[in-house]
Image (spheres, grey):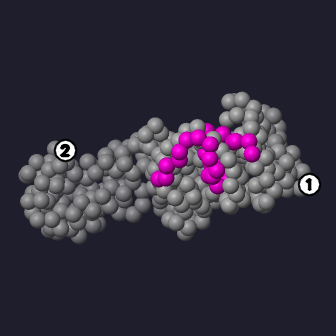
Amino acid sequence: MNERTRAYLSGRFGDYYRRIDIEGPPASNEREWGHIPFTPGDGTTMVRHQSWLDIAGGGSITEFLAREQPRHVYHSVGRYDDPDASRMSVKGWRGADLVFDLDADHLPGVDPETTSYAEMLATCKEALYTLLEFLEADFGFRDPTIVFSGGRGYHVHVRADRVQQLGRDQRDEIVEYVRGPDMEFEDLLRTETVEGLGLKNPTQKRLLPTEGGWGARVHRQLLDLVAEIRERPEEEALARLQEFSGVGEGKARAIVRAATENAEQLRDGNLDVHPAVVSVAKLLFEQTLAEDGAPIDEPVTTDINRLIRLPGTLHGGSGLVVTPIERDSLDEFAPLRDAVPEQFRDNEIQIDVTDPGVTTFDGEEGFMMEGGKQAVDEALGVFLMTRGRAEKVAE
C-alpha cells in the first residue's frame, strides 16, 4: 500500500479504538503483549516483550491502542512472572491456555488461488464445528472461547485449570488426536468374553466403542451405512456395498444379511456377526481418519509462548474485527457481515480499486467490484485497502 493509504488506515484504526472499550483476557497482567505498527514499506515490525503495565499503565488498553494506532494486536497464551523480560528463558513461565487455530489457507481442498475469501471462510467454519465436537465430546471442555480471527479463520481458547500446566509434548498429543491419530484399526477395538449358551470354551467378540472417541466415530459411520442399505432395494444395496474396495458380491450379500438379522448387535458395536462386517468397518475406519480430523495449525497449539490476536481489535489485513462468538450464536455468525466495524459504516470515501473482481462483503454476496477510482462505503473501502485491492484517493 502507498503512504497515503497507510496513513489513512492508521488514523482510522485509531479512531475506531477511541470509540470502543476493549478488555484484556484473564490474567492480563501476567501476559506478554505485542503489536505491529503501520510501518512504511512492505515489511512489518513486531513490537513485543511488553507487559500490561507497559501498554496500559494507569489507564486502559483502549487508550494505548487509540494512541499507537497499531495494525495488529496480540497477547500471549502463556502467563509469566515477568512478562516484559526480553528473553523467554527468564520470563518465568507459569502456565498457558490451550489454543487452537484454524486457517483457511491450510484446509484440505482449499486452493487460495482459486477459492474466494468468502468460500474459504465458509469451509473454515465447517472445520470449526469439527474441532468443537472434539473439544466438547472427547475432552469434555466446557465453554471454550471462540473467536473469529479477523483474517482467514478462527481461534478457540481453552482456559480450564487442567490445561494450564500441559507441556509441549502433551499438547502435541492433543494435536495428533484432533488431526487424526496414528493408529491401527485394532487399536480402537475392545474385546468381550462370550460364555454360556452351551459353549465348552469361552470365546471373544470384538466391539467398536459406541460412545466417545474415534471408535464411536467409526461406529456412527457403520450404523449410517447399515441404515442406508436397509432402506434400499436389495440390488441397490449390493451395488452400494461393492463400491468399497475388496467387497465383492459374496461379502456384500453377507453384510446385507447381517444388517437385517443382526441390527441390534451392530448397534451395540459387535463386529463379529460376520467377517465381512469387519472388512467394511476397517475401510470405514480409514475413511474416518482421513476425513473427520480437525485440520488445526499444529505450531499454534504446541507453542506455550505463542502470541494470539486480542479479541475486539482490528485485523490489519482485512479491516475486520477480531470477534468473540457465543457458542449458541455460531450458526448465525457471518464474518463478512458480523465482523464489519460499525464505526466505518455509513461514511462514503474515495478509493482507487487496483484489483477488481467479484467480492462478498457486509451481507452482499458476489457483487462485481470494478476497477478504478470510485466512491464506496468506508467499511468496504477499508476492507479493500487492507487486503491490498485498493488505494486511498486524496479528497
Q: What residue does disc 2 label?
A: 245
Where 347 sits versus 181, above or below?
below
**Would you say residue 386 sits in the magenta stretch?**
yes
Give the left or right position of residue 158, taking residue 83 as reference.
left
Q: Position of residue 201 (x, y in %)?
A: 18, 58
- In the picture, the quarter occupied by the N terminus is top right
**Residue at 16% across, 55% down:** 240
* Residue 58 - label: 1
The amino acid sitting under disc 1 is: Gly
Mark earlier in primary sequence (1, 2): 1
User: Which element type, helix, strand or loop, lies under badge 2?
Assistant: loop
Q: Mark 2: few, some, or many residues within 10 Å (few <14, many ≥20)?
A: few
Q: Position of residue 329 (x, y in %)?
A: 56, 67
Residue 219 shows up from this direction = yes
Quadrant into which the C terminus falls: top right
Classify residue 16 as left or right of residue 243: right
**Amino acid at the residue labelled 2:** Ser
Residue drawn at the location 68% of the way across and 55% of the way down: 348
Mark identifier at residue 121: none
Q: What residue sits 37% from the left and 48% below the top? A: 291
SS class, disc 1:
loop
State the residue in front, 177 or 394: 394
Q: Quadrant of residue 277?
A: bottom left
Observer-nearest of 152 and 23: 152
Q: Give whichever of 370, 22 is nearer the camera.
A: 370
Q: Is residue 30 something one can see in this rendering?
A: no
Query: What span is in magenta?
Result: 366-395
Quarter holding residue 325: bottom right
Residue depicted at 79% across the width and 53% down the height = 15
* Residue 132 position within the rendered picture, expressed as x and y whole percent measured from the top left: 51, 58
Q: Of 60 and 70, which appears nearest the observer?
A: 70
